[in-house]
Image: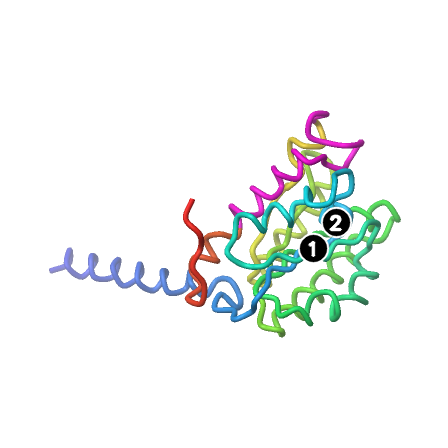
């Protein structure tokens, strides 16, 4: 009798946890119409030709329009000023946020960067979109942001995409200068973003993820 009770409890927990997993990411049932990639030069595609940026490559992998809302040199404070027109007004289903490099170069406090991104996430959630937070750290490079962003994503129930530049900034064949990827590097980023978001696209009842 005790064995049956334990098995029943385990089964209940599994059902409960599977239900929670569906609600882990805020707005998993988003009804938006676009994926908006919101960021700085890494999103913009600096160092590659138009069409070789990672949002353009990602657009070939998903069954939904992908918008490149990246601006070279953008900081989080500057990005907040264009959040409405460049992101929220574009009916986002999912927003991929990628910032911090320019904040770091301009010596902005890390806490200010995290707070600005937190505001971005909140506004995107209010608009009904899912959010994925991309981290550009690689090894020791910007590692302090990796932990802060992982904690922020967990707290906000957003998708976390760690170390999208890992193995790129140390490989001359994948970058155009000391930091920025080239076309092959952006393909690598697109694949990493795709792998991170596709499980949540597949959970959404309003769309059907492409096969292959």
Left or right of 168: which side holds 65?
left
Quarter of the image where the N terminus is located: bottom left
For the point 72% across and 25% down, which residue is it?
Answer: 172
- Magenta stretch, main secondary structure class: helix
Position in image of residue 159 (x %, y %)? 56, 55
Q: Identify the residue under disc 2.
A: 44
Position in image of residue 158 (x %, y %)? 57, 59
Give me the disc on residue 5.
Answer: none
In this view, the residue in front, 114 or 98, is 98
Q: In this view, does 67 lie above or below 30?
A: above
Position in image of residue 15 (x %, y %)? 30, 62
Between discs 1 and 2, the one toward the N terminus: 2
Q: Is residue 174 magenta?
A: yes
Cα separation, mark 1 vs mark 2, equals 7 Å
For the point 57% across and 42% down, which residue is it?
Answer: 192
Q: Give the range drawn in magenta.
A: 171-196
**Label 2 near label 1: C-beta < 8 Å?**
yes
Q: Is residue 172 above or below residue 97?
A: above
Q: Identify the residue under disc 1.
A: 68
Left or right of 202: which side holds 165?
right
Q: Quadrant of residue 115?
A: bottom right
Q: Does the magenta stretch include residue 132?
A: no
In this view, the residue in front, 33 or 13, is 33
């Amino acid at each position: 009798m005790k064995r049956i009770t334990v098995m029943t409890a385990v089964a209940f927990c599994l059902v409960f946890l599977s239900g929670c997993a569906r609600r882990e990411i805020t707005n998993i049932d988003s009804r938006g119409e676009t994926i908006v990639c919101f960021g700085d030069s890494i999103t913009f595609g600096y160092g590659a030709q138009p069409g070789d940026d990672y949002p353009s490559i990602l657009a070939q992998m998903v069954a939904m329009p992908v918008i490149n809302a990246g601006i070279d040199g953008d900081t989080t404070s500057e990005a907040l000023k264009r959040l409405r027109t460049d992101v929220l007004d574009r009916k986002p289903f999912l927003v991929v946020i990628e910032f911090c490099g320019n904040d770091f170069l301009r010596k902005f406090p890390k806490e200010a960067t995290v707070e600005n991104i937190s505001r971005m996430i909140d506004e995107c959630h209010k608009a009904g979109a899912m959010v994925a937070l991309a981290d550009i750290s690689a090894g020791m490079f910007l590692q302090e942001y990796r932990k802060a962003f992982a904690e922020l994503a967990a707290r906000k129930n957003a998708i976390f995409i760690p170390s999208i530049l890992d193995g790129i900034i140390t490989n001359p064949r994948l970058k155009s200068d000391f930091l920025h990827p080239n076309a092959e590097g952006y393909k690598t980023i697109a694949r990493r973003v795709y792998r991170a978001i596709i499980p949540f696209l597949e959970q959404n009842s309003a769309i059907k993820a492409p096969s292959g």
